[in-house]
Amino acid sequence: MKWSDTAWEEAAPVFRKVLEHPFITELAAGTLSRDRFATYLVQDSLYLREYARVMSLIASRLENPEHAALFLASAMENLDSEKAVHDLYLDGTGLRDIREPAMSPACLMCSSHLWRQAAAEPLEIALASVLPCFVVYDKTGKSVYAAAASSLDSNPYREWISLYGSGSFDDPTARITELCNDAAAASSEEMRKKMTEAFVTGVKMEWMFWNSAYIKEQWTI
């Protein structure tokens, strides 16, 4: 069994909670409030800015130039697609007039967590830490698309659902997964366990990010 299969088995209970979260179920039904979706988009834009920098840092740590190029290309494909959807929904909302929206506590936590993994942990753990963003969005998108398919034309979030449910993330997800599997195969059993822990933590972070948008989390002080 590949490391990624083992890691996904460990993360599966958390991912079930992701699919059951009202942000995701209401997104599929088209009943998610606009302000909750807008909150998510603004925070996701802030997060992706940091995510791109983290991906660049990890790529610089890969000794094989081909692997580094592959890693960056996969990351940029995802980021470009996501930015296009953000632009589509944010244009005309007035949200772009906010000079510098503050990161929510969850957004700051997720971003800081990735920076710590990328800068302070072994490369194997850094790779495992960024994989959930690829895998969770790929699997969640397909699940939402399947649930929304019968009424997609009338769903106000159909562009988001179509992007993440189209399978366009399959290839970059597979590439990053392969890099993680290669790193795990060359590592000790202890390192593979730490990679799995990092992966499961990343899946939990995805749940927390969507939950933060749903409750429109604010700083309490």
Image (cartoon, helix red, strand yellow):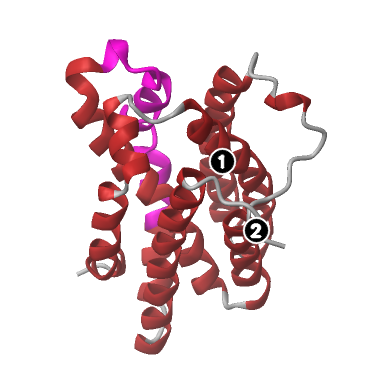
Residue beneath label 1, please? 73
Residue 10, image x and y in percent? 26, 71
Image position of 121 (left or right of 12): right
The secondary structure type at the circle numbered 1 is helix
Report crowding for label 2: few under 14, some 14 to 19, many 20 or more residues within 10 A (C-alpha).
Answer: some
Q: Quadrant of the C terminus?
A: bottom right
For the residues carrying marks 2 and 1, which lies nearer the camera in this image?
2
Residue 215, image x and y in percent? 48, 48
Q: Which residues are magenta?
A: 152-177
Q: Is residue 148 visible?
A: yes
Question: Which secondary structure type mostly characterizes the magenta part of the structure?
Answer: helix
Task: Classify residue 49 by image quadrant.
Answer: top right
The secondary structure type at the circle numbered 2 is helix
Residue beneath label 2, please? 108
Image position of 215 (left or right of 55): left
Q: Is residue 8 visible?
A: no
Residue 83, image x and y in percent? 59, 29
Task: Classify residue 184 by image quadrant.
Answer: bottom left
121 lies above or below 220: below
Mark 2 or mark 1: name the one nearer the start of the chain. 1
Q: Report, in whole angstroms, how far the alpha carbon at label 2 lies from the one at label 1.
A: 25 Å
